[in-house]
Amino acid sequence: MLGMRGKIEKADAFVIGAANYYSMLNGLSHCFLERFYQFRHQEGKAVAGKLGVAVGIGGSSGDRVVEDIKKFW
């Protein structure tokens, strides 16, 4: 995350997508979002006011994955 910090802080918007495995957010995406959370709380809301788009894809509906992503946003 350290290598991405500057890019995350400078970004105008975020598109976060994840695969739907067994109607839940996959582990890799979950780990990323847990680490991304620091930009909202420890850093004084470094991503506040920026647009975020959640995309969920998979064999069944991606709605549950999108809801999981929105919990972190």
Image (spheres, rainbow, N blue to C red):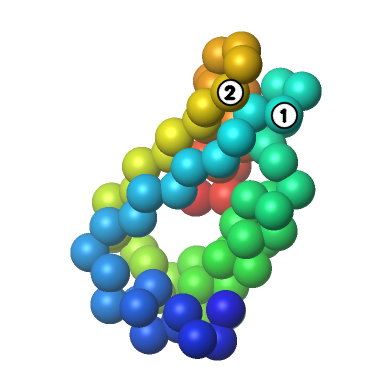
The image shows residue 67 at horizontal and vertical percentages of 56, 30
- Which of disc 1 and disc 2 is earlier in sequence? 1
Q: Residue at x 60, y 57 (%)?
A: 33
Figure check: 33 above or below 4 = above
Q: Is residue 57 visible?
A: yes
Q: How many discs appear? A: 2
Q: Which secondary structure lies at badge 1?
A: strand
Q: Is residue 67 visible?
A: no
Figure check: 52 above or below 54 = below
Q: Residue at x 44, y 35 (%)?
A: 55
Residues at marks 2 and 1, CA–CA distance in whole angstroms? 7 Å
For label 2, the crowd category at 10 Å Cα-Cα, with few meaning under 14, some 14 to 19 and many 20 or more, is: some
Q: Residue at x 38, y 85 (%)?
A: 6
Quick one: quadrant of the N terminus?
Answer: bottom right
Return the residue at label 1.
21
Q: Amino acid at mark 1?
A: Tyr
The image shows residue 51 at horizontal and vertical percentages of 28, 51
Q: Amino acid at mark 2?
A: Gly
The image shows residue 53 at horizontal and vertical percentages of 36, 42
Residue 13 numbered tag: none
* Front-most of residues 37 and 25: 25
Figure check: 44 above or below 61 = below
Return the residue at label 2.
58
Q: Which secondary structure lies at badge 2?
A: strand
Question: Is the Cβ of the residue at disc 2 closer than 8 Å to that at disc 1?
Answer: yes
Quick one: which residue is furthest to the left in this view? 12
Q: Quadrant of residue 12?
A: bottom left
Q: Quadrant of residue 50?
A: bottom left
Q: Is residue 9 left or right of residue 65?
A: left
